[in-house]
Image (cartoon, coloured by chain):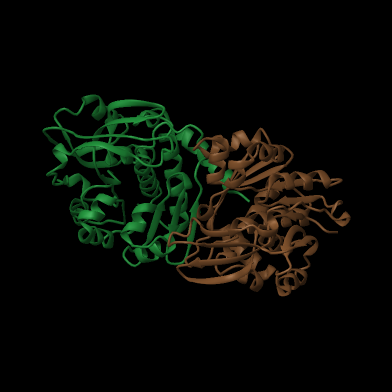
Chain colours: A green, B brown
Amino acid sequence: MISPIIIGTMALDSIKTPFGEVNDALGGSATFSSIAASFFSKPGILSIVGKDFPKEHMDFLHSRNIDTTGVSTGDKTFRWKGFYEFDMNEAKTLNTELNVLADYKVEIPKTYEDAEYAFLGNIDPEQQIKVIDSLKKPKLIAMDTMNFWIDIKKDILLEAIKKSDILVINDGEARQLFETTNLVKAANKALKLVSKAVIIKKGEHGALLFTDSKHFNAPSYPLEDIKDPTGCGDCFGGGLIGYLAKTNNFDEANIRKAMIYGSTIASYNAEGFGTERLKEITLEDIEKRYKVFEDIREF
Amino acid sequence: MISPIIIGTMALDSIKTPFGEVNDALGGSATFSSIAASFFSKPGILSIVGKDFPKEHMDFLHSRNIDTTGVSTGDKTFRWKGFYEFDMNEAKTLNTELNVLADYKVEIPKTYEDAEYAFLGNIDPEQQIKVIDSLKKPKLIAMDTMNFWIDIKKDILLEAIKKSDILVINDGEARQLFETTNLVKAANKALKLVSKAVIIKKGEHGALLFTDSKHFNAPSYPLEDIKDPTGCGDCFGGGLIGYLAKTNNFDEANIRKAMIYGSTIASYNAEGFGTERLKEITLEDIEKRYKVFEDIREF
């Protein structure tokens, strides 16, 4: 069965960091998330590309058992150009060409409607809501977003969050959306909207899980050489939902494990440009680093 | 036996945060560290105060079984005046009156020389070195510092670090001292100087332990109401050394536990102004929160 369903962007990224650069590399939130999820399950993507989207990228996704029936085709692929300075914490955008994304309306294949798990990656919240409404028997819906949608579509975004079970959001966006610098306060506000949990991603500082009664602090992996952090947040979300879908268990203890799997894949992703490290690693590598995560939090 | 020996400042702090203010409250690195250490052992302070230092503060320290034989007396106590804005991460200094600290030369009582554990809190690295050299049979020396000493006495500071076993330093200062934004790189450079371990304090993001072969990521406690973070880093260091001295064990696994005890006391400290929360809590409270720390990192 195709599950989880993952909506998000598919992009050609041109990225420069102090450690190198790539041009028109495979990128986008749906891309990173679905590759991460594919280590555990068979994701189906909802997105759009242009006629110029290289066939090799699509072939690669298929080779990973990712269903792309839900990928529409328009004229020209979404492109993002950006760079990172030495601190690597913040992407600076040089240029964004929305192209096919500008008027994207999601079209959901019949074969996706029975999926029980979904990850709504960063994209227009109106499209995220359409995905939620199309699922016939959803068990768990997790969603991500970004500051752009908080700025221009906050009401619709809040509606999408209310229809979700887990909000996955980065720390800066949590502070912005819930208008407080304190992440515990932000999480408590978010918990009033979602049915199950709030996960706050903190980049190099790990991630936090809040439910009504429990709290989990996921450690970060100590990376000495970060080449390109693009897509790490998407890998985290994709790994999370992929593991939850595979185990078909979303109690709090299993969400903790899923966060570590997400963190593991994200940490590998930062070691290379674009998706290059994701193409190299295996489930064995992931399990190996998962064990390192166990050791670095033990006391 | 008096141990650990703790050198640092004793101050009268005037602090304003969005949640209140205090004037001439008991403060200083040696004060916070020694109170934290006193939950586990019998610390001896090396510091200096003025004739204006309120007797009640000294009485309080004695009531906690803290030895103050090593506290010299000069004319006027060191004073710090500062404030925090809503994000609470950075203290903004309004005024510093060094007073007795300006020409402080540490005088080490005979009764301190047999101590096996020492914490060199933030103070002039020349005085830190004198303390190291005065100890007859030191087992473990941990030291802290701050950007001020990196700016004006970097060479002497590096000398002090080389004579220490554990460097305890905050993330910004680690980046500054070792000239890299990457904390793993900074830690690896620091490990070439110290004999045993490097601990990087990250405030609301917890703390990291690096030794030659292992890494530990200490979670942070999810505080919803932070009243005043002044002294939290000092509490962390004091709790750490106090626990190590009590257990007389500094293998890597025990340093991890000591970091959690330090984090526990620091988290309580942030809940009140100055030392007010430290005056209220008991070892029972600390053990209770230690268990919460165990739960928030379990997966």
A25 in relation to B110, above or below: above
Q: Quadrant of residue B283?
A: bottom right
Does any portion of residue A170 appear in the rendered image?
Answer: no
The answer to whether residue A19 is seen in the rendering is yes
The residue sitting at 69% across, 64% down in the picture is: B76
Query: Horizontal placement of B134 versus A183: left or right?
Result: right
Q: Quadrant of the N terminus of chain A?
A: top left
- Front-lying residue, B137 or B103: B103
Q: Is residue A81 above or below residue A174?
A: above
In the displayed structure image, the side of residue A270 where residue B100 appears, left or right = right
> Which residue is painted at 83% across and 46% down in the image?
B134
Residue B102 higher or lower than B159, as above or below: below
- Position of residue A252 measured from the top left corner of the image (x, y, whole percent): 45, 58
A9 horizontally vs B12: left or right = left
Query: Which residue is more in the foreground, B284 or B224?
Result: B224
Q: Position of residue B70 (x, y in %)?
A: 80, 59
Q: Quadrant of residue B110?
A: bottom right
The spot of residue A182 in percent (x, y) is 43, 61
Question: For this view, does B103 lie left or right of residue B226?
Answer: right
Q: Residue at x 29, y 45 (%)?
A: A3
Q: Residue furthest right?
A: B110
How many discs appear? Answer: 0
Where does the image place residue B254, in percent across and percent down from the top left? Answer: 70, 50
Relative vertical location of residue A11 with respect to residue B2 in this rendering, above or below: above
Out of A112 and A127, give the one closest to the viewer. A127
